[in-house]
Amino acid sequence: MKKSTQYRLLQGNEAAAEGALAAGVRFFAGYPITPSTEIAEILSVRLPELGGKFIQMEDEIGSIAAVIGASIGGVKATATSGPGFSLMQENLGYACLTEVPLVIVNVMRGGPSTGLPTSPSQGDVMQARWGTHGDHPIIVLSPASVAETFHYMVKAVNFSEKYRNPVIMLMDEVIGHMRARVSLPPWSMVETVNRIIPNMPPEWYVPYERTSMGVPPMASFGSGYRYHVTGLVHDEQGFPTGKSSEARDNIMGIFKKIERGFREVCLVDYHRMEDAEHAIVAYGCMVLSAMSAIEELRDDGIKVGLIKLGTLWPFPRFALEHYLPQLKTILVPELNMGQIYREVVRVDMGRAAVEKINKINGELITPDEIIKAVRGLAR
Amino acid sequence: MISNAELVKKYCRHNKKFPHIWCPGCGNGIILSGLLRAVDGLGLRKDEIAFVSGIGCSSRAPVYVDFNTLHTTHGRALAFATGLKLAKPELTVIVATGDGDATAIGGNHLIHACRRNIDMTTIIFNNYIYGMTGGQYSPTTPHGAHGSTCRAGNIENPFNISALVEAAGASFVARTTSYHVMQLQDLIKKAIRHRGFAVVEVITHCPTLYGRLNKAGGAPEMLKWQREVAVPKNKAAKMSPEELEGRIVTGVLVEKELPEYCDLYDEIIRQAREKAGRGGENE
Ligand SMILES: Cc1ncc(C[n+]2csc(CCOP(=O)(O)OP(=O)(O)O)c2C)c(N)n1
Ligand code: SF4
């Protein structure tokens, strides 16, 4: 094992795979799909080297099912997708309700349907939030560079383990296929989090009894703690229930644990926001265009800054609220019809003027287009 | 042989979960008790058994018994079980699934599990109908039979589950009925002992829906029918296709030794480790 930091030329998808391994992921199930196939290819080689396992399932429905099974078996696990994300939705809800940690990497491509297979898009933001049926909490991270992809992947695994909730790495094709030289820390320097396991004797184990953190300890199958896991609404014992009080506790319990971790799971960065009168709210590849636009606009004396959303869900509303008093306008560039824009409008509540730029044809929004829009707003 | 009372005491969950949801006369309980007797006969520890199911009346079986139990989504039990087995190969994985769960919505996972030959046992409760949702026709409902969505008679043709899984590559296939309780436990025992993907198809009865919609009588009549149509494999070998028309061949239909998936994967790991030299970390 290399003890020192390594510098490597990596693609975003490779960085996601490396991040997963560094975070302790030892199981992967997937089905090939552009633009995330590289993740499966890399892990098919790397996992067995580490004693882990890779399986190519018959479809994405089976992939996420196998990942849930492996996670219940006690192994940190991931799945990958694209439009296959649509096929994963039912079992994603299963993992939310049964509180099984797992990470899904969705490298978004143009949709709907088979769409634009090799073009960038950010069209799955709302699907990531609400794709499975029923009310449920979810954590969605969106990296904006290759290096960040590695670090976010580690965080995604850690959050899923800590909160016993699925986490979605929502990447776009630009980040997934971009190459950059990144520094990879030795694994001993990577902070990893493992799910809490029960420390009481099996007779005393109440599988869905929450700790003070709001998260129930999770025993893996075969560890001597025999219990029941079901996608039916269940009581603390894990058994199906139709009692309204128990149903409420079950659903509210999964919401509350994420509410409790809200600040921790909200990854936000700010750039030149101290004196900003205009803000660009961006995530994923749109951060790159926004950053170069800001350099030029600042040279022109326009006080503009960036609120970079690393976490999309739960929506980090405090990031906006903090700056709203000083802001005149907010611009939201997105490769969709305005999915995060709606959230920004909701939080803004009429305080600053909120504008959007959208593209859904596979092209990127260029720095020039952002510059033009901000100039128009600042006038 | 272990008595019913002992069986219940030893394997059923004492905390909550009874009475069960099955109708009086339903065949599902007979199959569950067959499984428990097989487990008892093999002397398996409760901790080493993972009992996985999909959705349907039959798929409710795991909740009642004191194993590691996983009640998944409709049709997907085998895919969940595959991940679980790979993560914890030391578990004895048993899957309970209905004819609709296994061969309609879960048909794809079934055939792929067969060809992978991963070491687990799948018990298919074939009652020829969708019980849980109210008697709609399933992929095994006979041509001409009635269901709540084929009142005029089924115009589709049924799967022969045992033939289907054999063709898909299952290394162990057996069939019996819920009438043949001794054969049932014996076949489940053999299936669990088999190293590879094993399927036991159990022809069973849903008096509430299939029985009523097809005027097939109640549980006693339906059990009698199972006794009448069943033909042991060796006897069937001497019968003509005409004589076998409408009969159900029982016993071990396929048993072959094939490389098992987890074993093969262990070899992949061994080779990969050798090639990578060390742990393969951070490089
Ligand atoms: C995705 C999905 N579609 C449909 C259903 C509704 N559903 C529940 S059980 C079932 C059929 C079960 O039939 P079978 O597998 O034959 O089992 P049985 O109830 O007869 O034991 C259906 C269609 C569901 N739960 N999930
Ligand atoms: S509906 Fe049919 S299969 Fe379901 S419990 Fe009743 S008898 Fe059994």
Image (cartoon, rainbow, N blue to C red):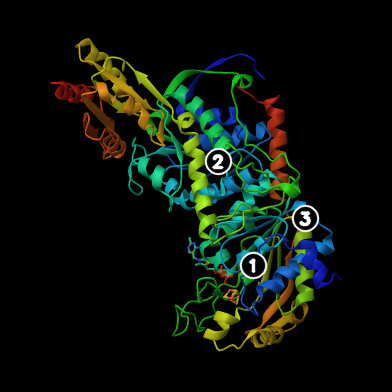
Foreground: B110 or A129? A129
Amino acid type, mark 3: Lys
Q: For this view, does A186 lie left or right of residue B29?
A: left
Query: How dense is the environment of label 3, judged by Cα within 10 Å: few (below 14), some, or many (20 and up)?
Result: some
Task: Judge by depth and name the residue closer to the eye, B54 or B79.
Answer: B54
Residue pictured at 57% horizontal, 81% vertical:
B208
Residue beneath the point at 76% across and 51% down: B48
Pointers 3 and 1 within a single chain: yes
Q: Nearer the viewer, residue A374 or A336?
A: A374
Would residue A104 be seen by someone viewing this image from the given angle? no
Question: Where residue B141 sits in the image (x, y, percent)?
Answer: 54, 77
Which structural element holds mark 2?
A: strand
Same chain under badges 1 and 2? The reply is no
For the C terminus of chain A, the image quarter is: top left
Which image quarter: residue A235?
Answer: bottom right
**Which chain is mark 1 on?**
B
Q: On what subunit does the disc labeled 2 rest?
A: A
Sequence order check, earlier mark of 3 and 1: 3
- Residue A361: which disc? none
Return the residue at label 1. B124
Q: Which residue is mark 2?
A: A102
Q: Which residue type carries mark 1?
A: Ile
Give the Cα separation between the discs numbered 1 and 2: 29 Å
Q: Which kind of residue does numbered mark 2 sit on?
A: Leu
Q: Which residue is mark 3?
A: B46
